[in-house]
Image: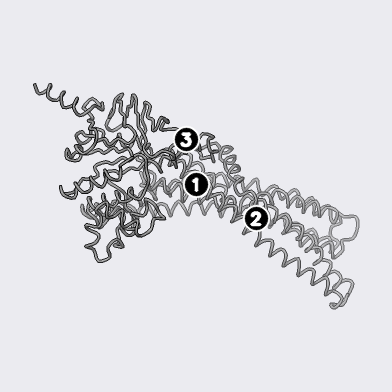
Amino acid sequence: MSIIDSTPAAPKAAPSREIKWLRRQGRVGRGALGLAVMVPLVSACLTVTQAYWLAMILHRAIVDQVPAASQVPAITALGGMILARAVLAWIGEAAGIRAAEDVKQAVRRQLFADLMRRGPDWMRQRASGELASQILDQVEALDGYFARFVPAMIAAGLVPVAFAVVLMPVDLVVGLLLLLTAPLIPVFMALAGWGAEAASRQHLTALARLSGLFADRIRGLVVLKLFGRAEDEIARVRGASDEFAVRTLAVLRIAFLSSAVLEFFAALGVAGVALYVGLTYLDMIDLRGSALGLQAGLFCLLMAPEVYLPLRTLAAHYHDRANAKAAVANIEAAFGALPEAAPSPATSAPVGARLAGRRALAVAAVDLTVETPERGTILSSATFEIGAGETVALLGPSGIGKSTLIEVLARLRGHSGRVEIDGIALDAIEEGALRRKVAVLGQRPRLFHGTIASNIRLGRPHASDREVREAAERACVLDFADRLPEGLDTPVGERGSGLSGGEAQRVALARIFLRDPGLILLDEPTAHLDAETEARVVQAILAFAWGRSLLVATHSMAVAEQMGRICVIDGAGQIVPFEAAAALELDGAA
């Protein structure tokens, strides 16, 4: 099995559902999209006028022998029409691009909001590279549908018929010939389009797999180098890239086939009109019953290619529709449902305001149960409380569930049971209010490429340099930053490269010191620190937590003893007071 086909292909969604969803998304950019649709229709009116004036100018010059000087106004008007069509084409293209960008931005926001709603627990089960590909590459595939295909589809549905009807009073035979041959092109184009859609679906699925493969290998590059597997993985990525190139060429072959079918029938139609006009002028056929003038013949010959031009444009962009449908199917397969712009719940504002208006937040959990496929039941019908302004330490051996409890309280992990913050159900709290008032520090804080100061400033982007330095001093960051040549302006690599675990932990703690949370959740904040630095950091945490609620998960008894209350997670997945756990342990030993 090939690398990029190592997982099952996405199930094919119903075409009607995909198209309906695309149309709903088009409402976002309907102003620009409406302009992009109207431009070809207005340009079509100018096309008829332009062909008529050109035929008239040539007729007057050849048949009527009108001097060139007398035709200057007509020639000037003709030049103005050509210029107007060029300007309209530019406006239509710009409007289509604007509409596509608005739609893509809206869809990406919906997908990102969906990711935030699902939380890290859901994202852990999927490849980050593939999710990134859905938001970037798959959404980008919608560009051609809105920028080019939709305007071309409207024009192809209206303009050829309108042109054929316009030609009927001039010559009924030409009008009927164009009216009968034009519909053959969409029929054969649709037949080729079915194959293009299937190939596009496989192509975009392969792109998502390749993106996930590449992103995961880049993230684990250091490990691969350490174990001498880098060359093997390079060969795998190269093989997947070559296979992706083959799939790309397959899509292009089908796209060229549909274009060739259209060109064939368009050439037949134009040749039929030219043959009819030529034989009529030679008096070899007479289907009109009256003489065909030069102006009428030239008008028919000039309009014949224009009848097929909208259909040729549609064929050139028909694969954009197939790409968009395949992208929508892949997005639905990856997220389980297509994103929709959800209206803000009426209760969001008051719930958020209630949290924002309180400094110390109380926490209550009843019948809290957390289960994972890998580890089974971690917490089982546990009951837990933190009073407003209380400081609580959470003890327990590694893997017992301390980090899990913190993730649950921060709404970063799914659970059953009821969890409330300040009497409000955790699931009902508005996302922005929750993130503003609940500060979390995990065991492996995420630092980004930048300086130490810029990583601290993530806690409050508009903080001044003085405030950043004060937070760094409080978190003991200056202990090591001042020894560096550039101080707080020292560059830091992605994921904190260049800093030790304890240093990265203190940088992340300084972020919290820039904020104003009502509930602080810390997971091993003093890990990797010596006893002296640990004592200073704990004192800084307690000083900052004055008037706020604090939960610290720790292995250090020295840290736990400085909190107002100590709790323990026991082997049964229950959260019990430290004294009760100690008594049970003594009874067990006896």
Q: Earlier in the sequence, mark 3 or mark 1?
A: 1
Q: Residues within 10 Å of mark 3 (few under 14, many from 20)?
A: some
Q: Report x, y in % for residue 342.
A: 53, 38
- In the rendered structure, which amino acid carries the disc numbered 1? Arg
> What residue is disc 1 on?
109
The structure residue drawn at horizontal position 23% and vertical position 48%, both measured from the top left corner, is: 537
User: Which is nearer the eye, 139 or 478?
Assistant: 478
User: SS of the residue at dot 1?
Assistant: helix
From the image, which quarter does the C terminus lie in?
A: top left
> What residue is disc 2 on?
312
User: SS of the residue at dot 2?
Assistant: helix
> What is the quadrant of residue 443 in the picture?
top left
> What residue is disc 3 on?
351
Q: CA distance from mark 2 to mark 1?
A: 34 Å
User: SS of the residue at dot 3?
Assistant: helix
Q: Nearer the viewer, mark 3 or mark 1?
A: 3
Q: Earlier in the sequence, mark 2 or mark 1?
A: 1
From the image, which quarter does the N terminus lie in?
A: top left
Q: Report x, y in % for residue 350.
A: 50, 36
Q: Report x, y in % for residue 264.
A: 65, 55
Along the horizontal axis of the image, is 251 left or right of 179?
left
User: Which is nearer the eye, 314 or 425?
Assistant: 425
Query: Disc 2, disc 3: CB below 8 Å?
Result: no
Q: How is colour applied across the structure in the image?
A: one colour
Q: Report x, y in % for residue 122.
A: 38, 38
> What is the quadrant of residue 245 in the picture?
bottom left
Along the horizontal axis of the image, is 50 left or right of 520?
right
